[in-house]
Image (cartoon, rainbow, N blue to C red):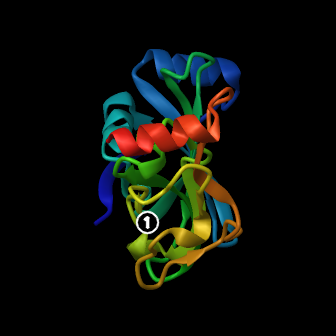
Amino acid sequence: MAEVVQVQKREGSLGTAASRRLRKAGSVPAVLYGHKQSNEHLSISQKTVESILRHHSKIVELQGAVSETALVSDLQFDPLGIEVLHIDLQRVDMNEKVTVTVPIRFKGEPAGGKQGGIAIENAHEVEVECPAVAIPDFLPLNVASVALGENRTAGDLSLPDNVVLVTPVETVVYHVEKPKGLTEDETEEEGEAE
């Protein structure tokens, strides 16, 4: 279910200096937009933002200055990727379809790795379209059967009901390649030795 987030309305100046003062006071600037309504400039406490990140929340229930359901559509980080500088929140109806990025979770040890191959994760996430209430936390992909020289594509992911893949199905997300200098004979010898 959606995480409850307390928000305050930002009044007065909205520029860079005002945002820096807000962050120094322990809050993060945010903007709520969408559904053909006017933008709302908000602030969220730093601790709440850390909780959103820790729980990988995609849908949040806003309370306080506004009472709405929103999708965390973008997080802007500092150059080191440590501190959240700004959050974009998009208004959503819980039954409306949204397009989101979902991480891939690879499971298993590839068979090609036992033959001396190098496993490469080409993509760590894919885009999907689904109802806002049914956004998956991750998509599993079993790679145990991937042999040397084989790959798995986005089309090989197992999708829950009501989830449609937006990323092209032929996009390679995982493959096992033969290391340079490894000959066919060495590959066969390593396979027989195990």
For the point 31% across and 31% down, which residue is it? 47
Q: Name the residue nearer the viewer: 172 or 185.
A: 185
On-image quarter of the C terminus: top left
Tell me the kind of residue under disc 1. Thr
For the point 64% across and 35% down, which residue is it? 183
Q: Name the residue nearer the viewer: 91 or 79.
A: 79
Where 3 falls versus 50 (above or below)?
below
Find residue 7 and report its horizontal and vertical position in percent: 40, 46
For the point 32% across and 39% down, which residue is it? 54
Residue 42 visible, this angle: yes
Residue 10 visible, this angle: no
Residue 45 left/right relative to 165 = left
Q: Quadrant of residue 49?
A: top left
| Label 1: how many Cα within 10 Å (few below 14, some 14–19, many 20+) | many
Q: Secondary structure at mark 1?
A: strand
Q: How many marks?
A: 1
On-image quarter of the N terminus: bottom left
Find residue 157 and report its horizontal and vertical position in percent: 50, 68
Where 93 falls versus 172 (above or below)?
below
Where 130 falls versus 112 (above or below)?
below
Where 19 falls versus 109 (above or below)?
above
For the point 67% across and 61% down, which residue is it? 38
- Residue on which the image places disc 1: 69
Find residue 188 and report its horizontal and vertical position in percent: 50, 44
Q: Name the residue nearer the viewer: 171 or 128.
A: 171
Residue 126 left/right relative to 55 = right
Find residue 86 and report its horizontal and vertical position in percent: 57, 34
